Image (cartoon, helix red, strand yellow):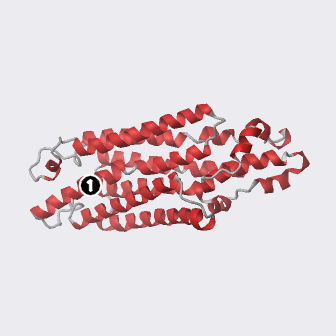
Amino acid sequence: MAGVAKEAVVPIEAVLFGISTLLVLARLALRTIRQHQSLTVSDWFLIASLLDAAALFGTDTAAYNLGGMDEYDPSAPPRSIEDQITLMKVSFAGNYFYDTGVYFPKLALLALYFKLIPQTLPLLRKFLYGVTALTGSFMLTTCFLDTFWCGSNVSVNWEIDGECSTFDSKTVFRIDWVMNLISDMLVFALPFPLLFGLQLSRRYKAGLVAIFASGLITLGASIGRFATVEAIHAWTNVYVLSMTEIAAAIVVVSLPALKSLLHGLGLRSSKQNTTQTGSGYNKHSGTVTTSSHFNKLSSGRDHHRELYLQVGPHQCDLPAKRRR
């Protein structure tokens, strides 16, 4: 399989980084300017994700300038010893920005789930705590593994005749990938029991499912990257897929909080649903259910949380004639 032209890697990554930056800025502007609210824990993890993506873009750009993508280009000029050492240092740093940094969007999404999943679902809340602890432990394990795989003398990673390199280790790559994939699948699956259990309009629920299902892009990029390293050997693709995975993860985290985008998908507030359903609809309970969870997604604040817990989800059902 032919790889992406080395000259195209940096421009492609720039586009991916630009898209993720725009969405993050839109989310932060919505929170601070339009809603006049302070940043949430999820927002701060999202900012860390964007900074990490910027660092990854920087190391990939440096790798290109140092000839790191010339390995399979017979016409590439030879590199000096100094450039080779600098490239190995850049590659070692890049391990952190992908292998460890890819967990920041997961933590941002998990922080959002703590706002989204109510106390009235204790089993799902326990699962959320477990997934959060596992994801955090995977992140720390990845960081220490990338740092000390070659021993306590980290500088061996950028020795010309060094016998060990974390960046080139297939074992490290496979261990990191397995932990990344497991955490991705768990984080991806978490919101769906809640979404399918809520009494929401079809279009509202379809929009939320579509947003959270966009996490499949992240999974696809991760699997594609693994296949490329293990079998395809189109190394320039690895750079692009790494940025694709992180950028896609940032997009997935940003979308649920962008209320305007949810409306753009055709979602309607409970007030509009009340108009459509007629006198058989319990107006008060419908407003609590829909607006409460929508508010959690859009702002990270839940002004109806206490009322929702008092009413209970069983009182928020639509009449049978409206459940189709």
- Is residue 122 at all visible to an observer of this figure? yes
Q: Which residue is mark 1?
A: 93
Q: Is residue 58 above or below residue 292?
A: below
Residue 118, picture quadrant: top right
- Is residue 5 at all visible to an observer of this figure? no
Of 90 and 206, the residue lying toward us: 90
Question: Outermost residue, right direction?
Answer: 279
Instruction: Inspect the image, locate mark 1, and give the three-letter code of the amino acid beneath it.
Output: Ala
Q: How many marks?
A: 1
Residue 180, picture quadrant: top left
- Please indicate whether residue 70 sits to the left or right of residue 285 in the image: left
Q: Position of residue 45 (x, y in %)?
A: 46, 53
Q: Residue at x 19, y 59 (%)?
A: 87
Of 5 and 161, the residue lying toward us: 161
Q: Position of residue 207 (x, y in %)?
A: 65, 52
Question: Outermost residue, top direction?
Answer: 123
Q: Residue at x 34, y 61 (%)?
A: 55
Q: Position of residue 295 (x, y in %)?
A: 66, 53
Q: Residue at x 62, y 48 (%)?
A: 209
- Please indicate whether residue 267 sits to the left or right of residue 1 in the image: right
Q: Secondary structure at mark 1?
A: helix
Of 121 and 230, the residue lying toward us: 121
